[in-house]
Image (cartoon, rainbow, N blue to C red):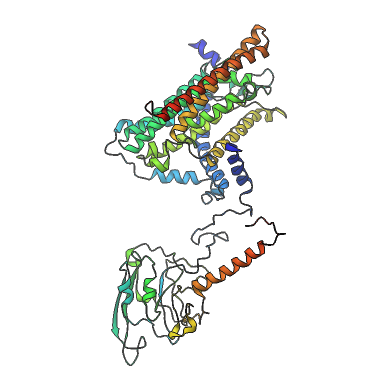
Amino acid sequence: MILMLAALDPLLDNVDGAVVLIVLLKVVVSFFVLLISVMAMVWFERKVVADMQNRIGPNLAGPFGILQTLADGIKLFFKEDLLPRNADPLAFRLAPYLSLIPAFTVFVVIPFGGDFSGDNTGVVNWFGRDTLAQVADPHVGVLFFLAMSSIAVYGVMLAGWSSGSKYPLLGSVRATAQMISYEAALGLSLLSVLLTSGSLSTNTIVDTQSGWNWNLWVTGIVPFVIFLIAATAELNRPPFDLVEAEQELVGGFHTEYSSLRFALFFLAEFMNTITMSAVIVTLFLGGPNGPMFGPDWVRMFLPTIWFLAKLLVLLFVFVWFRSTLPRLRYDQLMDLGWKLLIPLSLGWFILLAVTNVADGAGWNPVVAGVITLAILGVAGITLRTAMRTAAVRRAAGEVAH
Amino acid sequence: MGYLGGFAVTLKKYLHRTETGRVVTREYLGGQGGDEDQKRPKPERAHGRHVLNRYEDGMEKCIGCELCAGVCPARCIYVRGADNDPEAPTAPGERFGFIYEINYLRCIHCDLCVEACPTEAITETKLFEFSFTNRADAIYTKDELLVGDDGKPQQLPWEDWRDGEDLMTSGWMRATAPSGDANFEGIIAWSAELGYGVRAPEGGQALEAAEMAAAEAARSAEHDDPDDHGGHH
């Protein structure tokens, strides 16, 4: 047990009171930073969307309306907490927490600082102790992220089911199907990263990207794009927000929720956006990697600044998606997920695997790549033909829809 | 550009907002804000709360005929007439409006009362920001509706007015041919308003339509010019 812990973090080599305090500090600080950043994110999203739509956005609560989220939160806090008559009380009360807690816990494995340049492995020295600038670095960091995002599905599913009302049920059925479908594309594009980095530990993944070897271009842009799309779907953000689809489903899975429970869902949604962006930064954009310069005290903060800058860019991209793209229809969503993203990410993964093996075995990379591409091309054409044939037969009424 | 064209549009909007550099929404804080808190100019025929008018000599125009109450589809007007005191008449003629109440919880601002009124006693202002907080305030009595001695509407404590908003407050009236004068056929004329004098007659919709058609014809004639390839069509 001690051996296992020791490998996780240099801090845990010999545990004493100070170490426990440092770990506690990390947990508490990241908890509150995350909470506050959610507030900022809600404000940021509303402001940016307003700018893109020639509106002003919140501007009354505090300077530039930055306290708007706080005002909304206080309002929600004082609202009546309703429990619908047909609701399943236990599941209804449990669901918001199932949404919120995974959103929090994913952030645990995100390295948000630490010098990775040269031979450094992101170890920082805080209060005279060596540690990593992340709450925990389990060997299965990426699997932990996938597990948590799978649990988050339960929050949405149970919320819809336990409400005992038809619109939430429809919303949660959609959500479950959508999140499970896109989890596949998400996982497959993630495999490309794991193949390149050769580790499930987020710290090692970031470390292998040091020196501008960002997975974004090392894996070839495709996995990043697929991951970004699948992540948007996984987050139920526009244009994949069929789960909420105000025009059809009232409020979707959270129609029956009010007061603090609704606030928890709201919080979870935006926190998920932040943590998912952080995951993308870690996996594809080199995490806290970036040019290092200046005196020691600057070098201490630079990685965190790079991390935040990348995070901000991604958050902007998510908001940009929202204000640009109209919502997909349900069948379009499923078509995109199953017929395009999954085959594409799988094919790209095979291509990367082949070039990896060719590299190790000393084969001619060009020949190996061309042969793989040809095989994948044939497979792709076969798949397309199959889909065309099925569509034609469906149109002719030979098979049931 | 297909899917990506939209991203360019939103980004351009984000960076430049509109071509004029202004946002299309306006600040409206109900009088709490500073310079940015502006009301939009109201349309000429906006229907707001009513006023009961007077003649220049201070006599009330209302004769208590109850036509407004009869025509009101929302049944929000309650009028009772009474005989004038011959020594000190309230309104010219035999009768005057003794009780006049409008319930603004019911009023739909359709302006039918204004059209029904034979003496132009009741007109609608453009004031619509009167958010009362109890039912008693919602019922405007005759004292509250009647214009003051200066002939201008009275501001009640819960009404939000800005400078100059009481000017030209009277609602648009479909008055045709005053005194049956054929010269005023299709032209809106106004009776004198205490405090505001006499407003110039307006052409009305028929005349406006004719003017617009003429302007349109002039513009299209300009565009027939072969040298003009301006982008504004």
Looking at the image, is B112 positioned above or below residue A59? below
x 42%, y 38%: residue: A244
Looking at the image, is A114 positioned above or below residue A56? above
Q: Report if residue A282 is visible in the image.
A: no
x 60%, y 14%: residue: A372
x 38%, y 45%: residue: A78
Q: Nearer the viewer, residue B39 or A17?
A: B39
Quadrant of res A376:
top right
Residue A205 % position (x, y): 59, 19
Q: Residue furthest left?
A: A85
Residue B123 % position (x, y): 42, 75
In this picture, residue A364 sits left or right of residue B88:
right
Residue A149 % position (x, y): 46, 26
- Quadrant of the image containing the C terminus of chain A: top left
Quadrant of res B125:
bottom left
Looking at the image, is B190 positioned above or below residue A134? below
Residue B47 % position (x, y): 43, 68
Q: Nearer the viewer, residue A343 or A232?
A: A343
In this picture, residue A336 sits left or right of residue A216:
left
Q: Nearer the viewer, residue A21 or B115?
A: B115
- How many numbered markers are drawn? 0
Looking at the image, is A46 positioned above or below residue A9? below
